[in-house]
Image (cartoon, rainbow, N blue to C red):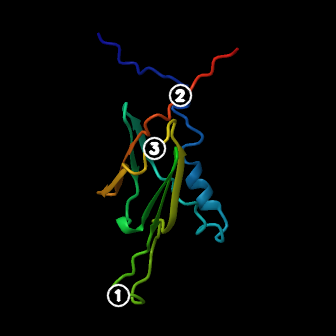
Amino acid sequence: MANNLMRIDPFRDLARFDPFRDMDEMFRDFAPSVWRGADVSPRMRMDVSETEKEYLVKAEIPGVQKEDIKVAINGNQVSLSAEVKEEQPATAGKTGSLRTERYYGQVQRSFTLPQEVDDDQAEARYENGVLHLTLPKKVGTGGKQLAIQ
């Protein structure tokens, strides 16, 4: 005869307990109405990889036109900025917004690479909401180790 007793583990729910799981939603719900529209701008997500000759950067910038993206290179510092413009509905003034969660405005990100970039050979392309940068390393700018005398 099989044992049909159910195994009881009083700590099972505690093991899955995550006190911070819904903290963001809780603060949004209880925040004063004056703070509700003051969300911080989203962070631009990036992947940076390196080969022997170049750095490869992929930055997610959805919802922008390529004309609204700016890339600045100064030695080994790279700065990205873009403006996410609000779409104007064709039926302006006739419809009301029930919920607005999308971000409109300026996003920017700067980072420093280990080696200087040859900005004359650098390339950028934007497709499907992702900015692809190919940043060749400048020849002869590697670090130098000094001999101690």
| First-in-chain label (2 vs 3) | 2
* Mark 1: amino acid: Thr
Look at mark 1 in the image and give the residue it sits on.
Answer: 91
Q: Position of residue 130 (x, y in %)?
A: 35, 53
Residue drawn at point x = 42 percent, y = 40 percent:
48
Real-space CA distance between mark 1 and mark 2, rounded to the nearest whole angstrom: 51 Å
Label 2 CA crowd tier, 10 Å (few <14, some 14–19, many 20+)? few
| Displayed quadrant of residue 91 | bottom left
Residue drawn at point x = 37 percent, y = 34 percent:
53
Residue drawn at point x = 50 percent, y = 35 percent:
141
Q: Is residue 87 left or right of residue 38?
A: left
Residue drawn at point x = 62 percent, y = 56 percent:
27
* Mark 2: amino acid: Ala
Look at mark 3 in the image and give the residue it sits on.
Answer: 117
| First-in-chain label (1 vs 3) | 1
* Mark 3: amino acid: Val
Q: Secondary structure at mark 1?
A: loop
Q: Position of residue 36 (x, y in %)?
A: 60, 67
Q: Which of the pair 12/83 is nearer the observer?
A: 83
In this view, the mark in front (1 or 3): 3
Look at mark 2 in the image and give the residue it sits on.
Answer: 15
Real-space CA distance between mark 2 and mark 3, rounded to the nearest whole angstrom: 49 Å
Q: Which of the pair 30/39 is nearer the observer?
A: 39
| First-in-chain label (1 vs 2) | 2
Q: Which mark is residue 101?
A: none
All told, the count of numbered labels is 3
Q: Is residue 72 above or below residue 141?
A: below
Assign the C terminus to one quadrant of the image: top right
